[in-house]
Structures are given as structure tokens and as C-alpha cells.
Amino acid sequence: MLDEFPETLVNVEWHSSSFTPGDSDFDDCIYYESVGACYGARGSMYGVGGIPHTQWNGVESFVGGWGGANWQPAYDNFVPIYQSMVGGDTPYDIIINGLKEDLQVTYEITVSMDTDMSNSNMKVEIIVVEDKIMSYWGAVAIDHNARNVGRHWLVTEDLNIMYEGESQTFSGSFEIDGEAWNPDSVKIISLVQDYDTYEIFQAQQLNVNEFDTDQDGVMNNDDNCIADYNPGQEDIDEDGMGDACDICDNANIFIPGNVNGDLWWYDTGSLDPTVSVDIFDVLRLADIVTSGDQESCGYQAGDMTGEGDVNIIDIIALVSMILDGTLGNVSLNQAGDSIL
């Protein structure tokens, strides 16, 4: 069903230590800071006794299954439950965003409202899960994916908003267990749940590799400016950093040698300026080398040897090229400047 209804069906698997093989860590889910406590916390919420137990939107339960990996009867029972709930009215919308750097994940979850509703004992839960863990199910002797296994129930926060147009943001961070989890399959799931009735009013999920920090429709992994809105991904100098966040145009201005980034109008009949490379670029490059500056656009333009490390050799190379009157596609003019 998760494959059949990927946009509207969200689940979390909570595994009991009594039914988890000894070589599996599915029951090691961290409840806040307590390892292995997730199942007990969630199970007591719903009064779980028999296994398997499914809880739909927090208010409708189904207990039991069929032997021999016979999934069809379960499917036939679950689909009507799902169909009776999907598309129901809810005042809440959840947007999950964040930033993943190596194994460190920073998240920002915004809950907003489009109609009024009481916030009495209303909570926002934030849960880290790992999806599609290929596992051997001994009772039926088959390999099959475990879906959205609870790994870390991070927090349960009070929801303070209650009026149309209001929003509330929840932020935090966590570290992916790079040895026990597959970083490509880690998701954040967030729920809005009434802790009096346990009804769930909204749920959203997002793989941590699919964050879109600037909301431009391009995922962070593919975005050439993660924090700047640029749906077109323009990159005039094709250096992998988009124009929206790249102050160095290495194709037209900060070309090799133009350390100062000067542009001159040598041809008064042209509206386009010309790059200038001269003694001032040598002086600027010397200043960059002696100061240890590695962040400026001039540092990029001053790598005359192409070795990626700007030093005294690059200064000598730049002086030599200016004196020789050759600088790639730049030549020396009669006034003593090298111009494009």
C-alpha cells in the first residue's frame, strides 16, 4: 500500500523486542534519549496487546494477521480503512525542510493552519525513520523490505497555534548512525496529534537527502545555490556555483590574471567593458599571497599555474605573462596594459 499510495499514506514501524530477532536492531529505536523505549511509549498510547497491531490515524486499530505470508486478506481489510480516512478535512499543513551535511542533519518543520481549531493538548511529534531495510522474515522464510522503521523519536512538542493563518516552526538536529543505518534511506516524519483522543490530524514525511532549503524546486543535492532561490540554476561561468550565490564571474570578469576584477571601456564605441590585467593585478596578487586570503574572487583569478594553490610562483607567472604580452586569450596593448 505504501507503494500504491506514496503521497497520502505515511507509516512508522515500531518493533517489539519480544518479536525482534537477536541479530536485528529494529527494537533499538531511541525514545528521546532512551534506547529501545519507542515501542513501549507508542504501545502504551494505543493499548497494544496482540501483534501485529496497526493503528490508523491514531483512532482505528486492526490486530492480527494471516499465516504463510498471505498478505491479500490484510490488504483487503486495510484498503477500506485507508479510503475512509484519506482526503479528510484538516486545518493543518506541515512543511519539512533542513540541511544535511555528511551525517549531521539540521531540520526545520513548519506547521500552519488554514482554519481555526483548538490547540488543547495538541502535540507535534518528530520521528526519524529508516525506510526499505531488506530483512529476512523467518516465520515465512522470505526476504522483504521493512518500511519506515522507527529509529529515533526525537521530540514531542506543544502546538501553540489555533487560528487561521498562524504558523509555528520547530527546529533541531540529529546525527545519522552511519554504521547502523543507510543514510540514503533516512526520513523525517512529523505528525500533529491530539493527546486526548490520539487522533492524528496531519502527517508528512521527507527523505533527508531531498531537502530543498531555498524552496526553488531543486533538491539540495542538485542545487548550485542551496540557500538562494534560483529555479533556473543559472551559472554563467559554469563553475558549479550558481549566479545567485556566486560573486565571482570566472568566465567574464575574474578570468585568470584579472585579480583586481577591473573592467575598462577602451572602446568608447562599445557598450561592453574590457578586462584589464596590469601591474595592479600583480600587486593585488602579492597582497593575497602574503595575507593568506583564500576566499576572494582574486584568489581564484590568481591561480596562474592551475595547481589550485596560489603562491609566489603564481606572482612570478603573472609578471612573466604581462611582460611577454601573452596571457591566454589576453594580449598586451600599446599602453602597457594586457586587455582582452
Image: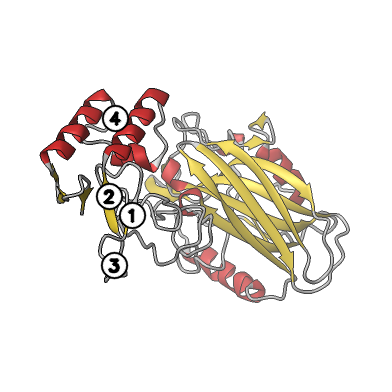
The residue sitting at the front extreme is 335
Near mark 1 (Cα within 10 A), the count class, few <14, some 14-19 or many ≥20, is some
Q: How is the image coloured?
A: secondary structure
Residue at 62 percent of width and 60 percent of height: 95
Eyeballing the image, is 119 above or below 255? below
> Please, what is the three-letter code of the amino acid marked with disc 3?
Thr
Q: Do callouts 1 and 3 mark residues in contact (Cβ within 8 Å)?
A: no
Left or right relative to 209: residue 47? right
Q: Do callouts 2 and 1 mark residues in contact (Cβ within 8 Å)?
A: yes
Residue 298 is drawn in which quadrant? top left
What is the CA distance from the residue labelled 1 to the residue labelled 4?
A: 23 Å
Residue at 66 percent of width and 41 percent of height: 154
On the image, numbered disc 4 is attached to which residue?
310
On the image, numbered disc 2 is attached to which residue?
276
x and y percentages locating residue 320 in the rendered image: 15, 33
Residue 60 is drawn in which quadrant? bottom right
Q: Along the polypeptide, which appears first: circle 3 or circle 4?
A: 3
Which numbered disc covers residue 268?
A: 3
Secondary structure at numbered mark 2: strand
Q: Along the polypeptide, which appears first: circle 1 or circle 3?
A: 1
x and y percentages locating residue 99 in the rendered image: 53, 46
Eyeballing the image, is 74 above or below 259? below
Residue 138 seen from this side: no
What is the CA distance from the residue labelled 2 to the residue labelled 1?
A: 6 Å
Q: Along the polypeptide, which appears first: circle 4 or circle 2?
A: 2
Which numbered disc covers residue 61?
A: none
Q: Along the polypeptide, which appears first: circle 3 or circle 2?
A: 3
Q: Do callouts 3 and 2 mark residues in contact (Cβ within 8 Å)?
A: no
> Please, what is the three-letter code of the amino acid marked with disc 2?
Ser
Which numbered disc covers residue 263?
A: 1
What is the CA distance from the residue labelled 3 to the residue labelled 4?
A: 35 Å
